[in-house]
Amino acid sequence: MLRECRGVPGGDPGAASATLEPPREPGPGTVRARRFLLGLYLVGFLDLLGVSMVIPLLSLHAKSLGTSPTVAGIIGSSYGILQLFSSTLVGCWSDVVGRRCSLLLCLLLSALGYLLLGASTSVFLFALARVPVGVFKHTLSISRALLSDLVVEKERPVVLGRFNTASSAGFILGPVLGGYLAELEGGFRLAALLCCSVFLLNAGLIWLFPWSGTEVHRTENGLGRPRHQAQSGSRDHEPQGAAASSMAAKSSPLECWAEVRSALLDRRSLVSCELGDILLVRLLMGVAVMLYHSNFVLALEERFGVRPRTSGYLISGSSALGALAGLTLGPILRLYGHNLHTALLHSNVLTCALLLLYTSAGTMALVVLASTLLSFSTAIGRTCVTDLQLTVGGPQASGTIIGMGQSVTAVGRIIAPLLSGVAQEISPCGPPGLGAALALVAVFIMTFNKPRSKGAESGRLKGK
């Protein structure tokens, strides 16, 4: 049962006095807060639904423009490079100006990028359209940071898992709709314009969210408010996004940029040895999974003579299971006593073992088993590593920390294709075999380096 706000020791007197009150039935503010979370799940679903309609068609559109495979590859890589440099900056910017302002701007500029993409009739316009998307397509990262602002630490991985499930469902349905549109005349333009419309719809949803009416206090039910607001005792009924946005509205762009720059300099200490180890584990596991996916269809065809259509069915089924894995995080973490480090370690061990099983599999039955379980273990691992980053770095700089993780993932997207090409020269089993070796290194790092929470230190940085 959801409850009203409880006081926090060391907080303001009003919050302390709330501890003397008995639990009450859910009030209007609690109901609005729950709707707020459900609205964010819908935003995540629509985001990847729109993007996944366009991504599979990019190579076909580039070919129709007369682009060579090399140029198309360079344009595709530019997205990862832009994400590498913009992820941390945009995440820190969302910490400073607020989630609402940053989400709205990122959604609108991403919509502009997909509008340009649909209207592109030359290679130059095609490349230009990828710039706003590469720089500002961080809506999911900011949404995860907002979720971390709204929930207590114990409930955070469960909420993030549900968010990942909703967004993954969009990524499963999007290619189907995009493939149908591709068969129509001007199909790519229709898909890009529909994606643009989806981002505009998301911007409208974010604008209509009950930012000022949602009670986001830190409570046992998981609906909470940022600690720096709890300590100040002000804006008791505003989440961080609304409060920071109202302050940002009173500042000039130069002042906002100065605050972002100052915050980035202050938060360099977040990249401590412990957080650095977690980011390294994220990189190694990310590259390992990317290597597994890099030649999946080709490897099955060469090893077992499997047709691409059959491989596609296997990929779709595994993706669906991976999407559902987020719903099991609650029971799994209760089984582990909410020990994220141990849960992530065991997830990585399972991923490493399954990569080895897939690499050495002599029958398709073993391949199906390994692929099915891999989708489950990697989905659990992605959520756990994100939550562990927030636990070690502290939730008060959640935008910056999640942005760092996205930058690390962008590095993996740049490295993985190169490693895959080299490993595939040796054997079709080379990329997943190399991925298993990298996963084993990540397991060793986690085994010998157990992190300690940095929440208090991060809170001091946020206060600056």
Image (spheres, helix red, strand yellow):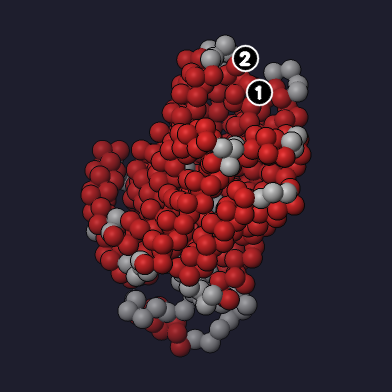
Nearer the observer, 24 or 8: 8
Is disc 1 in contact with disc 2, using a CB cutoff of under 8 Å?
Answer: yes
Q: Which residue is drawn at 39% across and 58% down?
A: 278
Q: Residue 394: give x, y in percent of width and height.
A: 36, 63
Q: Report, in whole angstroms, how far the alpha carbon at label 1 lies from the one at label 2.
A: 10 Å
Q: In this view, does 404 lie to the left or right of 313?
A: left
Q: Residue 80: give x, y in percent of width and height.
A: 45, 35
Q: In this view, does 402 lie to the left or right of 166?
A: left
Q: Residue 388: give x, y in percent of width and height.
A: 43, 63
SS state under label 1: helix
Instruction: Identify whether 65 is placed above or below 398.
Output: above
Mark 1 or mark 2: whose residue is earlier in sequence: 2
Pointer 1: what residue? 188
Evaluate whether residue 376 shows in this view.
yes
Q: Residue at x 29, y 60 (%)?
A: 273
Q: What is the quadrant of the N terminus in the image?
A: bottom right
Instruction: Identify whether 106 is placed above or below 183.
Output: below
Q: What is the quadrant of the C terminus in the image?
A: bottom left
Amino acid at circle 2: Ser
Amino acid at circle 1: Phe
